[in-house]
Image: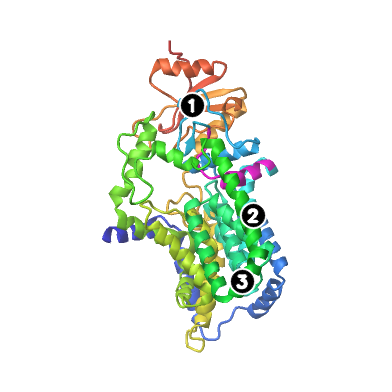
Amino acid sequence: MSDWLDNLWWDLTQHTVLFPYELAVLVFFLLLHAIPGFEWPFLTAAVHKFRRFANRRPLAIAAVFLFTLVGHFAAEPGYRTPPPGVHDEFSYLLAADTFASGRLTNPPHPMRFFFESFHILTEPTYMSMYPPGNGMMLASGMLIANNPMAGVWLCAALAAAALCWMLQGWVTPSRALLASLIFAIRVAWLSYWGNSYWGGILSALGGALLLGAVPRLMKRPHWSYALALGSGMVILENTRLYEGTILNLAAAIWLLVWLIRNRRREIALWIAKAGVPLAALLAVAIVWMGYYNWRITGNPLLLPYLLNRQKFEMYGSFVWQDKHPGKHYDHEALRKFYVESEGYRDKEGYLRIQLQKPQRLWFFFIGPALTLAVIGAFGGWRSRRLQLAWISILSLFAAHLLVPWNILPHYAGPITAPIYLLLIEGLRRLAAFRRHAALPGRLLSRASLATVFFMLFFRIAAPSLGISVYQEFTLPWYSYGLHANFHRANVESKLLSMGGEHLILVRYRPNHLPHQEWVYNKADIDAAPIVWARYVEDPSRLKILLDYYKNRKIWIISPDDNPTRIFEFKEHPQ
């Protein structure tokens, strides 16, 4: 426990550079609001206009969409898309390239031994190991704007709009609009969800569709709400399978129990109007998912993810699974990752890892400014309006007690909607607390909101003030670019500017960190201007690769050198 507290303090003081400022701003606004008679100028008139606008519900949803999509560019005028660096990002980009090319997978490459890498399959077909959702999101950007990041931005805008729609079913329109704007600023604009290929934003969209359909179905069974519910379920199953299944089950069971308790006589009508369309959509989705698995693994019931883990994993994905010693790895980088890097769970211990999970989500979703909202939400834990939100969040944490790995914020993408429901309802309950006291709760609520919006401008100005807000491994709401591999991107850019076709042999030093992987390729490897391959010490084996690519200019690179060096490879093994 003491080690965990020490690490928490270290993360707060050393690896969340804006949190001390955010806390100081919150204290400032609390003191400001405590001044007798203090009121924000024009606040009453502004709130009235905001509520009038929010009451025009379709217009508010459209405004959130445009605000999220257009505002991203205004928030960071000098924005440069961080290149991929995390294993998952390259895997998703492989899927996107495959889908954009009109294929579901790619044939195994004859030189696949040299292309083997993390979180992809090289046989029986060459494809990402992940469910297709995030790859399809990135492929949409490639098809629309020839840029996979365009798919992320479009999905972020859709997620913010869907969150507004979802919250309109649970809270007042003005609070729904306010919460979705906070989401747009802190998640869609400034976090890694909206500025990387790592995922999170699409599962947030799925969760919003799912939980937005529930209160509407409770009022009136209709095929459109059933399709929204089913679409959310399908998105969740094809982005975050484990966490998405937890949320799907929680919502389905909760809705079924409500239906039996309150509409028992109308079950037949409900099934006809909502159950049949929902079942039809889910049936089509299940068949398609089985077909997708079959095209990649040869078995409709075998997920690409499971096939990859069966081949490589040393440590099981759940607490009851044993280690798998004696696995053979063709490349040292793979062995170091699966045997040494994934072995952190034994070093850190189960309890410490579980304690870190809410901490990591607090960094991303809440931070100092919204901690007061969480306190307000706990004050309303008995509210029927918040039952499903609490059940969803607690179910995910309970399910993760079975997972001996650390959690990353995008793992919790499915519960983004219930988290924001709790936050905005927590602010409302906070505002109603001790209304006539010397320091009424509304002052706490206003200080929290003022801090949220002030920190937007402070975050925008931070780089010009000499405050580095990028690549923080705690993944707070304001940071992105973790592991972004600018060196690899620069090498690719220089070689592309030279023209011609290139083969790059990647040679790692013994001290190489396996999380920094360079060997990833396009879906159609042989058609790509640049091919990345693993250097091997065996001359006869390397000769096979060089003969295959004898018409390409061959380079060798050592990513672990500082600075990174690349040379033309002139030695042809005999």
Give the crowd class for mark 3: few <14, some 14-19, many >=20 residues within 10 Å.
Answer: some
Q: Main secondary structure of the magenta part?
A: helix
Q: Which residue is mark 3?
A: 218
Based on the displayed image, in which of its 4 quarters is residue 263 positioned?
bottom right
* Residue at x-position 35% and y-position 42%: 341
Position of the C terminus by quadrant? top left
Instruction: From the viewer's side, name the closer residue of 478 and 202.
Output: 202
Task: Please tell me whether mark 1 or mark 3 is closer to you in this view.
Answer: 3
Give the crowd class for mark 2: few <14, some 14-19, many >=20 residues within 10 Å.
Answer: few
Residue type highlighted by circle 2? Ala
Q: Which residue is mark 2?
A: 280
Circle 3 SS class? helix
Precedes in sequence: disc 2 or disc 1? 1
Q: Which residue is mark 1?
A: 112
Precedes in sequence: disc 1 or disc 3? 1
Task: Please tell me whether mark 3 or mark 2 is closer to you in this view.
Answer: 2
Real-space Cα separation, disc 2 to disc 1, in angstroms: 40 Å
Instruction: List x then y, in percent, for residue 557.
Output: 46, 27
Instruction: List x then y, in percent, for residue 562.
Output: 41, 33
* Residue at x-position 51% and y-position 73%: 386
Work out whether residue 478 can be spotted: no
Give the crowd class for mark 1: few <14, some 14-19, many >=20 residues within 10 Å.
Answer: some
Circle 1 SS class? helix
